[in-house]
Each structure stands twice: as C-alpha cells, then as structure tokens.
Amino acid sequence: MNILLDKIEFGHFMSGDPKVIGEFIKYNLLEKEKEQIINAFASGEHQQGFESEAEQYYKETYEC
C-alpha cells in the first residue's frame, strides 16, 4: 500500500486514468502481497517444506 501511496503522492499517475492505476496494482502490488502472506504463513509454522501448504492456503483464501 505504501508503494501505491508514494506513486500517487509523487505524481506518477498524472493521467488520472483508473486503468493505469488498476494495472499497476494488479501486476505489481498484488504479487508482493501474495509473497508476504505466504512468507508469514510459512514462517509462523517454522517447518521446512511448508511453503507448498502456504501456497495452498493463499489460493484457498484469496483466489476465489
């Protein structure tokens, strides 16, 4: 979210086109959010090889 706010604050979306902002979120920020959720879930368990279960958790929870 901070990345998006910085982009807006510093005028990187001067066109004001919602499609440009939407594409930025879709292709940049959602992937970062996915990584953070998976890493947090996996590190909470402190188990080796738990990443595949974390990926499954993400898919079940966020990919409706």
Image (spheres, rainbow, N blue to C red):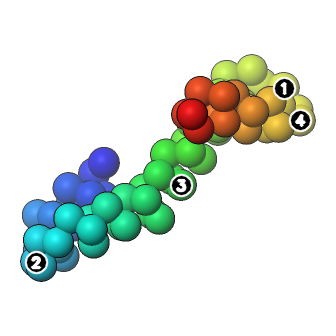
Which amino acid, by three-letter code, is at mark 2? Answer: Met
Q: Earlier in the sequence, mark 3 or mark 4?
A: 3
Amino acid tagged 4? Gly
The residue shown at (79%, 37%) is 51
Callout 1 touching callout 3 (CB < 8 Å): no
Residue 51 in view of the camera: yes
Read off the residue under disc 1.
Answer: 47
User: Looking at the image, do the residues carrying marks 4 and 1 touch, with CB atoms under 8 Å apart?
Assistant: yes
Which one is in front, 4 or 59?
59
Residue matched to label 3: 31
Residue found farthest to the front: 64
C-alpha gap between disc 2 and disc 3: 24 Å
Q: CA distance from mark 3 to mark 4?
A: 21 Å
Is residue 20 or residue 30 the one in the foreground?
20
Residue 62, quarter of picture: top right
Q: Of circles 1 and 2, which is in front?
A: 2
Quadrant of the image containing the C terminus: top right
- At mark 1, the secondary structure is loop
Numbered disc in front, either 2 or 4 = 2
Q: Quadrant of residue 5?
A: bottom left
Q: Which residue is mark 2?
A: 14
> Residue 1: percent from the left, percent from the top?
30, 48
Q: Which mark is residue 24?
A: none
Badge 4 is on which residue?
49
Q: State how far apart marks 1 and 2 are (Cα).
A: 45 Å
Q: Is residue 53 left or right of residue 32?
A: right
Q: Nearer the viewer, mark 3 or mark 4?
A: 3
Residues tagged 2 and 4 counted as in contact (Cβ below 8 A): no
- The residue shown at (66%, 28%) is 60
